[in-house]
Image (tube, rainbow, N blue to C red):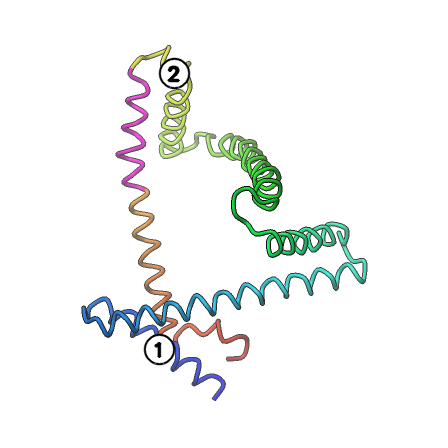
């Protein structure tokens, strides 16, 4: 029973949300909108469950003074402080949450994290540009052209360099990106159908 009921619920809602795209009737659309609102409510409770689980696990490590317990204490403290300030003072522009916590702290720290990625990208590019095959050589040449076209030095070397870079990004690169997106979309559809028809049951937990 613990397995059959979730599978039947998943089958019903999954098939209904697929069918509603092919049945342009107001009643079906209204019911689909209601189901989507239910999903938002369930997602909100999932956030609460995730936050409580995060606090519980980290506080357990802190209480036992496990590995890196200081960082976990900072994580829990920052989480609870941010949540408390947001609930009390609001999150609209002009509030302490928006102006101090988000704009003055979160945004600069997030930008710093993205900036550090440049060093990892440079390291990965150095390893990838070891030309051993013609595919690696093509990748290296394309990367050099794109990098030169994005800086003023490239335009000084050749005035049409930015136009060449735009063509590379909009034609060959776009073709590859769309191929990857199509493959990812087909994979997502296949995974969704496997869940709807009960082939994929990992969401039921272990031993299900």
Magenta highlight on residue 78: no
Residue 119, placed above or below residue 40: above
Q: What is the count of numbered marks?
A: 2
Determine the CA span between mark 1 and mark 2: 56 Å
| Residue drawn at the location 42% of the way across and 14% of the way down | 153
Residue 28: x, y in percent?
24, 73
Which is the main secondary structure of the residues drawn in magenta?
helix
* Horizontal arrangement in the rendering, residue 57 relative to residue 133 (left or right): right
Residue 205: x, y in percent?
53, 75
Residue 39, placed above or below residue 6: above
- Which residue carries the number 2 mark? 154
Highlighted range, magenta: 160-176
- Quarter of the image for residue 66 reads bottom right
Closer to the camera in the image, 24 or 139 = 24
Residue 17: x, y in percent?
30, 70
Could you tell which of marks 1 and 2 lies nearer the N-terminus? 1
Number of other residues with Cα within 10 Å of mark 1, as a class: few under 14, some 14 to 19, many 20 or more = some
| Residue drawn at the location 64% of the way across and 61% of the way down | 54
- Quarter of the image for residue 139 reads top left
Residue 198, placed above or below residue 166: below
- Which residue carries the number 1 mark? 11
Disc 1 and disc 2 in contact, CB within 8 angstroms: no
Number of other residues with Cα within 10 Å of mark 2, as a class: few under 14, some 14 to 19, many 20 or more = some
Residue 200: x, y in percent?
42, 72
Closer to the camera in the image, 48 or 175 = 48
Between circles 1 and 2, the one closer to the viewer is: 1
* Horizontal arrangement in the rendering, residue 63 relative to residue 27 (left or right): right
């Amino acid at each position: 029973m613990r397995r059959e009921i979730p599978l039947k619920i998943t089958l019903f809602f999954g098939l209904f949300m697929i069918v509603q795209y092919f049945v342009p009737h107001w009643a079906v659309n209204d019911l689909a909108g209601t189901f989507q609102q239910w999903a938002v409510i369930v997602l909100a409770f999932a956030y609460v469950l995730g936050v409580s689980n995060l606090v519980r696990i980290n506080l357990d490590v802190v209480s036992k003074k496990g590995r890196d317990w200081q960082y976990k204490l900072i994580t829990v403290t920052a989480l609870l402080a941010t949540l408390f300030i947001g609930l009390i003072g609001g999150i609209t522009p002009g509030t302490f949450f928006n102006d101090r916590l988000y704009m003055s702290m979160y945004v600069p720290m997030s930008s710093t994290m993205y900036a550090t990625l440049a060093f990892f990208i440079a390291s990965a590019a150095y390893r990838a540009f070891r030309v051993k095959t013609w595919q690696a050589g093509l990748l290296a040449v394309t990367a050099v052209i794109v990098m030169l076209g994005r800086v003023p030095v490239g335009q000084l070397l050749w005035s049409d360099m930015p136009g060449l870079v735009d063509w590379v990004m909009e034609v060959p690169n776009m073709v590859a990106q769309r191929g990857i997106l199509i493959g990812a979309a087909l994979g997502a559809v296949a995974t969704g159908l496997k869940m709807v028809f009960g082939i994929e049951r990992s969401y039921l937990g272990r031993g299900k």
